């Protein structure tokens, strides 16, 4: 698999925040969508923008590419208005020196729409300790519907820190305010896992849920240590594709600091959570599009008369479904503001399911866009290479020392030093240890312990039989440790690229 690093909006910050810097600038945006959160005004402007009909793919400098005026707040680029290309003709027909762009839609209205921001992030004492992003192979509307449904978490995300089937129970939700065109505020009470890092036992929490369309869903709740919030930024990327940005914030300190290993572990955990939803949501979206290929799930209330038993596409009699019902009803009235103006292809609704290696491709969906996980993947691959070389050299050294009647003292000491150096390389890597769990410190310390024992025996009895056994045992123990470490690190490498661990957790 070809790999390359790319910029990502998910670089985490662990310290206490300073005041955000707000800037405004013009940035080029591709016609098919934006990777940044959007505003209601930008969606209305994008809905009326003409698409480029050129047969060639637009380059970054091509004038067929629309431009968006954006505001950058807290390392998020928010497009607020668009300008259309000067011409819809072929690329070679443009005259950059004469053509001028024209604004699309009502730019003044777009600029006046407030950004959907979380005010607590500007409050004194609030921090955000981790960011996460992932590209998803299903539509923005499906993504929003999933993240505003709190009742699926204990069952669908069983085995993670977010879900436990033993905590599944009826969940009541209430919508206290609807914010047109799309948005609402409500409350729900959900069970929370015990958290040693956040210093609270298993409890129930009343959450205030606020969805500000199109790009902010906030869950705010209180724990004994203080207040916390989980912020989700759903972003439409293209028809049938979306991106999610997640930011978690709190206003209290913890004894455990969020270091690089903790952040990598959290990202791997979040990968599992989104893996568990992936196949179900893609299948749900395909079934809705098979009933009505409108691209946004408008068939959720359609009767399935052709199927045995009839009924409707969605059956939502429980109180836990009120958030989804509110969102879907508002979306029915405002779907024209979505940034896709062309109807979906008829064949997409009946396309075969994606292979699991594509559906759960963590590398393309997250890792290569996340600098933290990309650095961890590169470190993992370097350690795999070091372990492979160490195992081969150590086995050869053990064989030589075993067949030599009187091995040179210098060779024995060199093997002990090499074993200690390899162990030090593993122990210094933040991937090794209980936080990520790929390789334990005890296993990584085996070559170091063997080299120390060998050096002690060589110092006490340099010419005895015990010295010869210790000299051969040190590289042998190092080789076995390197083989085990390579296998464990291969498993960790797979967790950054593709793995079935989410399926195994759900079965357990």
Image (spheres, rainbow, N blue to C red):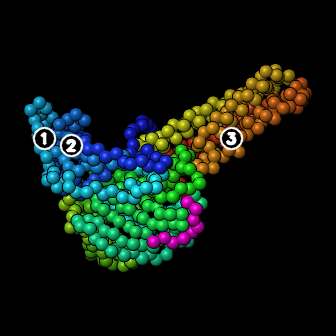
Disc 2 element? strand
288 magenta-colored: no
Range shown magenta? 198-206
Disc 3 element? helix
Disc 1 element? loop
Q: Which mark is residue 101?
A: 1
Q: Along the polypeptide, which appears first: circle 1 or circle 3?
A: 1
- Is 182 in front, or is 236? 182
Q: Residues within 10 Å of mark 3 (few under 14, many from 20)?
A: many
Figure quadrant of the C terminus: bottom right
Residue 437 as seen in the image, left or right of residue 404: left
Q: Residue at x 15, y 44 (%)?
A: 84
Q: Residue tagged by mark 3?
A: 444
Q: Residue furthest left?
A: 98
Percent of width and height locating residue 143: 35, 59
Q: Residue at x 28, y 55 (%)?
A: 115
Q: Along the polypeptide, which appears first: circle 1 or circle 2?
A: 2
Above or below: residue 128 compared with residue 166: above
Marks 1 and 2 close (CB-CB < 8 Å): yes
Percent of width and height locating residue 62: 20, 35
Q: Which mark is residue 67?
A: 2
């Amino acid at each position: 698999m070809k790999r390359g690093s790319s910029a990502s909006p998910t670089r985490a910050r662990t310290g206490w925040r300073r005041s955000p810097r707000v800037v405004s600038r013009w940035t080029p945006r591709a016609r098919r969508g934006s990777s940044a959160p959007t505003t209601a005004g930008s969606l209305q402007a994008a809905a009326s923008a003409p698409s480029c009909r050129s047969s060639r793919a637009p380059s970054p400098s091509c004038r067929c590419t629309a431009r968006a005026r954006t505001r950058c707040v807290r390392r998020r680029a928010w497009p607020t208005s668009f300008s259309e290309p000067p011409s819809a003709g072929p690329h070679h027909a443009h005259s950059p020196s004469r053509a001028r762009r024209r604004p699309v839609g009502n730019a003044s209205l777009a600029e006046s729409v407030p950004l959907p921001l979380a005010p607590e992030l500007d409050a004194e004492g609030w921090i955000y300790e981790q960011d996460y992003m992932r590209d998803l192979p299903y539509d923005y509307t499906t993504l929003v519907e999933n993240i505003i449904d709190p009742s699926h978490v204990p069952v669908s995300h069983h085995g993670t820190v977010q879900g436990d089937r033993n905590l599944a129970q009826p969940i009541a939700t209430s919508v206290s305010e609807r914010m047109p065109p799309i948005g609402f505020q409500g409350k729900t009470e959900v069970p929370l896992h015990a958290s040693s890092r956040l210093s609270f036992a298993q409890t129930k929490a009343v959450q205030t849920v606020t969805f500000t369309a199109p790009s902010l869903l906030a869950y705010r709740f209180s724990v004994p240590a203080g207040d916390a919030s989980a912020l989700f930024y759903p972003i439409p990327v293209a028809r049938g594709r979306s991106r999610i940005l997640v930011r978690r914030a709190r206003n209290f300190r913890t004894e455990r600091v969020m270091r690089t290993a903790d952040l990598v572990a959290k990202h791997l955990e979040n990968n599992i959570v989104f893996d568990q939803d992936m196949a179900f949501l893609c299948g749900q979206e395909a079934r809705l599009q098979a009933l009505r290929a409108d691209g946004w799930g408008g068939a959720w209330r359609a009767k399935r008369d052709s199927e045995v038993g009839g009924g409707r596409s969605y059956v939502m009699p429980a109180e836990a479904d009120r958030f989804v019902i509110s969102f879907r009803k508002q979306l029915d009235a405002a779907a024209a503001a979505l940034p896709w103006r062309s109807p979906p292809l008829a064949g997409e609704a009946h396309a075969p399911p994606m292979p699991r290696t594509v559906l759960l491709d963590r590398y393309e969906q997250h890792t290569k866009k996340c600098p933290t996980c990309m650095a961890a993947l590169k470190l993992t691959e370097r350690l795999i290479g070091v372990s492979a070389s160490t195992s081969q050299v150590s086995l050869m050294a053990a064989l030589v020392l075993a067949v030599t009647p009187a091995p040179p003292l210098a060779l024995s000491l060199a093997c002990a030093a090499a074993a200690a150096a390899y162990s030090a390389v593993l122990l210094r890597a933040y991937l090794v240890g209980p936080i990520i769990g790929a390789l334990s410190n005890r296993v990584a310390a085996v070559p170091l312990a063997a080299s120390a024992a060998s050096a002690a025996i060589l110092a006490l009895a340099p010419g005895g039989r015990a010295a010869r056994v210790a000299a051969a045992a040190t590289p042998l123990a190092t080789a076995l440790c390197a083989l085990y470490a390579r296998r464990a690190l291969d498993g960790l490498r797979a967790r950054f690229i593709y793995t079935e661990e989410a399926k195994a957790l759900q079965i357990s």
